[in-house]
Amino acid sequence: MSMTDPGLRRFEKPSEWRRYAETAAIPHEAGAVSPPETDADRVRRAHEVSLRAIDGVLGTGITDDAAGAAMIVVYVRDEATIPRLPTELEGIRLHPRVTGIVRAL
């Protein structure tokens, strides 16, 4: 929802925040086990700092290509950042995605 959406309600008091705190999109289940870490997860985590050190890199994630092979998504500010990125890390391909400047709302 956008901030202009009439269905979006602003909560002005902390007591209202607490009342709605348990309505998360993905509820936490005590004892839930995270899925096992994949090679792509391990490689992304190992290289996160060096990737973020490249001017224009905003963040990273994991995705799959059309054949189902895992790739590391690298979110970049603009097209000029892409040539500064490696094409792969430890055999995992990188997929740059131009997002523009990301601002917190």
Image (tube, rainbow, N blue to C red):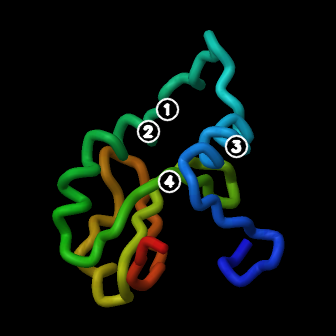
Residue occupying the point 41% across, 61% down: 94
Residue drawn at 59 percent across, 48 percent down = 69
Mark 3 or 1 closer to N-term? 3
In which quarter of the view is residue 74 placed?
Answer: bottom left
Q: Are marks 3 and 2 in contact (CB under 8 Å)?
A: no
Q: Which residue is mark 4?
A: 71
**Residue pointed to by mark 1:** 38
- Calculate the distance from the C-alpha at mark 2 to the C-alpha at mark 4: 9 Å
Residue topped by disc 2: 41
| Label 2 vs 4, first from the N-terminus | 2
Contact (Cβ within 8 Å) of mark 4 with mark 3 = no
Amino acid type, residue under disc 3 in the picture: Tyr
Tell me which amino acid carries mark 1.
Thr
Q: Quadrant of the N terminus?
A: bottom right
- Mark nearest the camera among 3 and 1 is 3
How far apart are the alpha carbons under marks 4 and 1? 11 Å
Could you tell me the amino acid type at mark 4? Answer: Met
Query: Residue 20 at what x, y percent from top left?
Result: 70, 43
| Structural distance between the alpha carbons of marks 2 and 1 | 5 Å
Give the residue displayed 63% in from the left and 14% down from the top.
30
Q: Counting other residues with Cα less than 10 Å from the Cα at mark 4, is it few (<14), some (14-19), or many (20 or more)? A: many
Vertical position of residue 17 compared to residue 3: above or below? above
Earlier in the chain: of badge 3 and badge 2, it is: 3
Secondary structure at badge 1 equals loop
Identify the residue position indicated by label 3 in the image: 20
Measured in 3D between alpha carbons, the distance from the residue under mark 3 to the one under mark 2, in whole angstroms, is: 32 Å
Label 3, label 1: how far apart the Cα atoms are:
34 Å
Quarter of the rendering containing residue 23: top right
Circle 2 SS class: helix
